[in-house]
Amino acid sequence: MSWLLRDNWLGSLLAFLLGAAITWRLLNRQSPAPTTPVAPVEHTTPTAERTAPARIASSTPPAQEAPAPPIAVAEEPAFSQLMDGEATLFDHIEEDNTAVPAGRYGEGSADAVPHQGPPDGFTIKGNAQSMLFHTPDSPYYGRTKPEVWFRTESDAERAGFTKYTRRPRKSPDPRS
């Protein structure tokens, strides 16, 4: 494959330069000027209410200063606070106060649904075959496929599950 660049280096260089020139031309292109001028929005307050910049003490009297040109200010929406009984954009959404239905192991448990995460507040995984539960600090927490979720360790123990604890491996007796 190296022969392609070795034998055609001049064509590769020209292609690179042409691509760089086209890219430079497209990036430096000026955007066309707008065809219709946009008029600035004038502020609706009288000129007397406008504040002028603070005057610095100088030797010239204030009467000789030129009047300030009119200031174009865009209208901004006013900040408002929620008042009692005022309608909001989220009134049509009802608050979801439905509790998680109790699982097959009673209150504080929830049945696991394949390919879904735990319900809110349920972080303890239970394995029904071994009757062990794993907390997030368990080394096998990530590998365990939950069959039931528990809210607290006491809920799992009340359902008859035992907390997983690491047990030392039995090693053969070195004396024999």
Image (tube, helix red, strand yellow):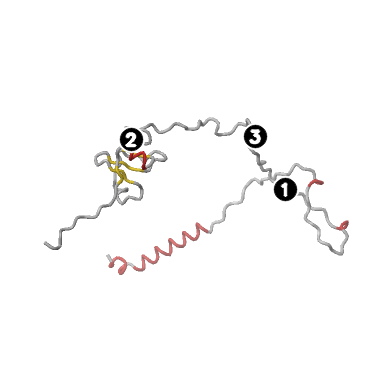
Amino acid type of disc 1? Answer: Ala
Local SS, label 2: strand
Residue 119 position within the rendered picture, expressed as x and y whole percent measured from the top left = 39, 38
Viewer-closest of 99 and 3: 99
Categorize mark 1 by other alpha carbons within 10 Å: few (<14), some (14-19), many (20+): few
Local SS, label 3: loop
* On screen, residue 30 above or below 152: below
* Residue extending furthest toward the front: 175
Determine whether label 3 and label 2 are within 8 Å by CB: no
Q: Is residue 65 left or right of residue 147?
A: right
Categorize mark 2 by other alpha carbons within 10 Å: few (<14), some (14-19), many (20+): some
Amino acid type of disc 2? Answer: Asp
Q: What residue is drawn where x is 73% and y is 44%?
A: 43
Q: Gap in Å between the C-alphas at discs 3 and 2?
A: 43 Å
Write down the residue under mark 3: 83
Residue 111 - label: 2
- Circle nearer the viewer, 3 or 1: 3
Q: Gap in Å between the C-alphas at discs 1 and 2?
A: 64 Å
Viewer-closest of 175 and 48: 175
Write down the residue under mark 1: 72
Viewer-closest of 27 and 110: 110
Locate the C terminus and report the quarter of the image it occupies: bottom left
| Mark 1 or 2, nearer chain start | 1
Q: Gap in Å between the C-alphas at discs 3 and 1?
A: 32 Å
